[in-house]
Amino acid sequence: MSLFLEFHLIQNFAPSNLNRDDTGAPKDALFGGQRRARISSQCLKRAVRLTAQAQELVPAANRAVRTKKLLQLLLERLAGRDPEEARQKIEMVLAGVGLKLKDDGKTEYLLFLGDNEVAGLAGLIEQHWDALVTSAGEKKSKKEAKAAVPPEITKQAKALLDGGKAVDVALFGRMLADLPSVNQDAACQVAHAISTHRVEREFDYFTAVDDRGDADETGAGMIGQVEFNSATLYRYAVLDLHKLMANLQGDRELALSSVAAFTQALVRAIPSGKQNSFAAHNPPEFVGVCLRHGAPLSLANAFEKPVAPRGDQALTAQSVQALADYEAKLAAVYGQAEDRWLVLDLTTRWPAERGQTQANLGALAAASQALAAQALEA
């Protein structure tokens, strides 16, 4: 049976520019024929990863890093060895598995590797230090470096690249162009967040004064403008529980703790764009977690017709009401009787009979983990 844990969030942000396009403007999109504020899924995923790390929601050994600086990471782990000799041996092993370093020591593209994978590669080089024969000052081509690595070491190195039970990689997947055999499909899908209402861009014209300006310098030291908006967003993500278990190599305990960590991180995650200028630290006013037994159901179309601002009601409250109404209509046709809701609702617009109300985020995360555990046992 398919098991999907869905996350539906309604979150209002004060004026901000959390995710910019190539012109510096807040990202937006046309939806339902109307201009909406938007935060990309890529931006949200990174915010989730950084939040989980900053709050230590996932053990250090089960985290991952996205970087071109694998050489530097391995050199740090081989700090007791001669740096130049270590560099040559690292280049040999990486060439053996098909990864090339450019002249600046960086990989050609960003790698997404688990901490255990990086540690494993460093340990392998340390273990086979003498077998990895290098010559001082010698510069090998990728082909020559690859051929110089004993086949058994190459085999062990490739076996180490199994995701390393990294929760980040298990959730969001990875693609390594030179090593398609270690690619991993994501267990989690994240939608672009869109505003539930029509939105217009606004401009903040600003000036800055030179603190050491001369007496005759009465004007501004610089002028400029920043684009921003304020929006109530619908955020949606869905987690395939069986896929998460598989990506974590069948480690059920880690998969369940990952559900709790993901719940906390997803709710708390706020992109960092222009936060020094806007400080839009506004948590969601509604978080619904739904266990679906058939297929995932995004509720974005609840806002195909944009919510219209009213003087007597908050946009968040109207948005939660629209979400609840649409979910009732959609679930009656496409949902299953076994589907279950957990709710954290500050607007009081979500029907009390539809799901278990949670007192706070910690309780929601624990209940999500318990719901996932019961579903996987059934």
Image: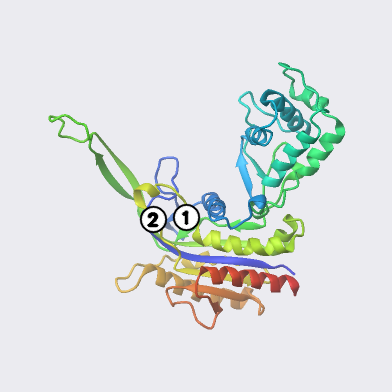
Check disc 2 and report the residue beneath it.
280
Direction from residue 209 to residue 32 in the image, left or right: right
| Image position of 287 with respect to 214: above or below | below
Identity, as a three-letter code, of the amino acid under mark 1:
Ile
At mark 1, the secondary structure is loop
Hey, which quadrant is residue 89 in on the image? top right
Q: Position of residue 157 (x, y in %)?
A: 79, 38
Q: Is residue 315 left or right of residue 293?
A: left
Res. 30 mark: none
- State the residue at coordinates (63%, 57%): 188
Check disc 2 and give the amino acid type.
Answer: Ala
Q: Quadrant of the C terminus?
A: bottom right
Q: Quadrant of residue 76?
A: top right
Whether residue 146 appears in this view of the structure is yes
- Farthest bottom residue in view: 353
Q: Are marks 1 and 2 in contact (CB under 8 Å)?
A: yes
What crowding class fits label 1: few (fewer than 14 Cα within 10 Å), some (14-19), or many (20 or more)? Answer: many
**Residue 7 sits above or below residue 329 on the image:** above
Residues at marks 1 and 2, CA–CA distance in whole angstroms:
9 Å
How far across and how far down the image is residue 34, in percent? 42, 58
Where is residue 148? Give x, y as percent: 82, 25
Q: Which mark is residue 270?
A: 1
Q: Quadrant of residue 1?
A: bottom right
Query: Nearest the camera: 75 or 94?
Result: 75
